[in-house]
Amino acid sequence: MVTGVLLFQAIACGALSGIVASNKNRNPAGWGVLGFLFGLFGLIAVLVMEEVEPQEKEVSGRRSSRQSGAQEFDPDKHEKKCPDCAEYIKIEARVCKHCGREFSDEEVKRQVEERRKSGSRGRRDAENYKSDDHDTEEILSTHDFNGVGICEDCDYTRGYAKANNYVCPGS
């Protein structure tokens, strides 16, 4: 009976340690084994560890880019500013949903191609994404994480803001 309870506890701690490690971008199998062997101590250890940034894979000696041009371009994630009412609308929109301004098919195709070639992230590029020479702590200080790991203003995680040098627009 006691052996069964201890085995159940070891399996539970191992599984929980693996899940928590996976959420923190750490090796779930390794931490699962540690949780299984050390029980509650392994689980506590993985809970107090900080999240690690996901590493980008190397492709042919070069770092892979999240914006590799046409292959990963998703028009639904890009917006344009209407020249009449200054509201943001989807880049493929042919009619502004705010003021009714119509865009020609050629104009829409040109804007999509320009955005696809530039590889930009969307409307918030210039103002919120900073180059790599900015201080990470300075960028993180613009967010209001309040201990939950997600900014209350922009809904991005600490890891995303840090990896992408994203300055919170709500700051």
Image: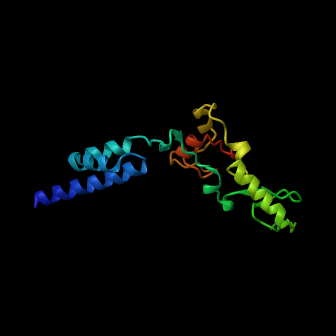
Q: Quadrant of residue 2?
A: bottom left
Camera sees residue 20: yes
> Outermost residue toward the front?
60
* Quadrant in which the N terminus appears: bottom left
State the scheme by which the image is colored: rainbow
Q: How many marks?
A: 0
Q: Nearer the viewer, residue 4 or 87?
A: 87
Q: Quadrant of residue 12?
A: bottom left
Q: Residue at x 73, y 51 (%)?
A: 123
User: In the displayed structure, would residue 166 be above or below residue 115?
Assistant: above
Query: Where's residue 112, x and y in %?
Result: 75, 58
Q: Residue at x 56, y 46 (%)?
A: 160
Q: Nearer the viewer, residue 95 or 97?
A: 95
Q: Nearer the viewer, residue 87 or 151?
A: 87
Q: Nearer the viewer, residue 11 or 119?
A: 119
* Quadrant in which the C terminus appears: top right
Camera sees residue 146: no
Query: Where's residue 105, x and y in %?
Result: 82, 67
Query: Where's residue 69, x and y in %?
Result: 64, 51
User: In the displayed structure, would residue 42 be above or below residue 135?
Assistant: below
